[in-house]
Image: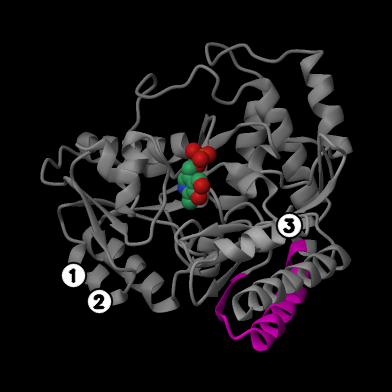
Amino acid sequence: MLSRGRGIHLYDEAGQDYIDLVSGIGVASLGHAHAGLAAAIADQAATLLHTSNLYFHSLQGRLAERLAALSGLPRAFFCNSGSEAVEACLKFARRYWHTQGDVARTEIVALERSFHGRTFGALSATWAEHYRTPFQPLVPGIRFVPPDAGAIAAAVSSVTQAIIVEPLQGEGGVHPLAADTATAIGDACAKTGALLIADEVQCGLGRTGRPFYYQALELQPDLVSVGKALGGGVPVGAALVGERVAAAVAYGDHGSTYGGNLLACRAALVFLEELIDRDLIGHVRAVGAFAASRLRTLADRHPTIVDVRGEGVIWGLEVDGDAAAIVEAALGRHLLVNRTAGNVIRLLPPLTITEAELGAALDTLEAAFADVAAGSAS
Ligand SMILES: Cc1ncc(COP(=O)(O)O)c(C=O)c1O
């Protein structure tokens, strides 16, 4: 029962202190109770919260401009979550081929281990069957391929509307796409004309030390979904759209009552000011280098850790069994980490975490590994 937070600390109702390496699953990007964000939200609440998209307001334009400068994609559609951002990307891809009159284009190619959200389109492109099976029938035309170069080259053809990929897969276990996989994706799009959708909801907006992880892979997506970190805790998502797709979408094709309201845009602008103007992104790169070396040392000392993957402030420690016991032992030591893909301990701290804070948290994580080893030895 958490009731209060400050920076990387969370406090329960009894006042006990926890170190938060989950940040609301990659959302509390500036840490908890960030003074600048809190002041901006309070000021906006006292000024104007919402007007709908029937009328313009300048915050939305300013936010779109900033996201366009970071991504190189000139248009933005605002919504309220990552799933909705993915949903918008999928709809815009369909709309693009409808406008071209290319009725043969019916397929979307998605990757194994993908997670894109839980609305029907996003869920249909999500790989793990336990998410999808209870909700059949899903959106048709989605085809899953392993994230390897040969499989992608074979699967993408003149019937492919779009390839949707997380440049760094989050829920699937923190797997950055391999360089040759990324090259195959770029080549397949160039060869067949298929659009590329990069889902940056979890790995984007500075978490890897770059604005977007597709940039590290030298991919050029037509559509990019963002969410999570963008509002620092205020729900906001966006589909960033290249000109050729945007030109195919007509006013009124898609919409959202709340999407891009003044509160959400104000919060997102505060986040981007911190990220870019105050160089939080440079801080993430430095903390990321520290994390890489500390986590590799941790893995050397604990043979149950079979792989360490990640960058910046997104990390996965793959263990040789279920990761639940470690997560539980960490919680017992008031450290919040989470398990994904069954055997991966995922770390998604606020972008603001310092080296000293992360170092202390990793000491606690190491103690949790020792607790579990001692428990299984006894
Ligand atoms: C890559 C990715 N896409 C989409 C989503 C869905 O976002 P939301 O839960 O905000 O709808 C998530 C959520 O974890 C995600 O990691």
Instruction: Point out the stretch of residues depicted in magenta.
Output: 284-310
Mark 1 vs ligand 1: CB below 8 Å? no
Residue located 18% across and 46% down the image: 141
Label of residue 154 in the image:
1
Across and down, in percent, residue 301 comes to: 69, 87
Query: Pointer 2: what residue?
Result: 150
Across and down, in percent, residue 298 comes to: 70, 81
Q: Report if residue 167 lies within the magenta region.
A: no
Query: Pointer 3: what residue?
Result: 332
125 in relation to 292, above or below: above
Residue located 44% across and 45% down the image: 242
Instruction: Please tell me in which quadrant of the rendered image residue 291 appears.
Output: bottom right
| Total numbered labels | 3
Residue 110 appears anywhere in the view: yes
Left or right side of 289 for 76: left
**SS type, badge 1:** helix
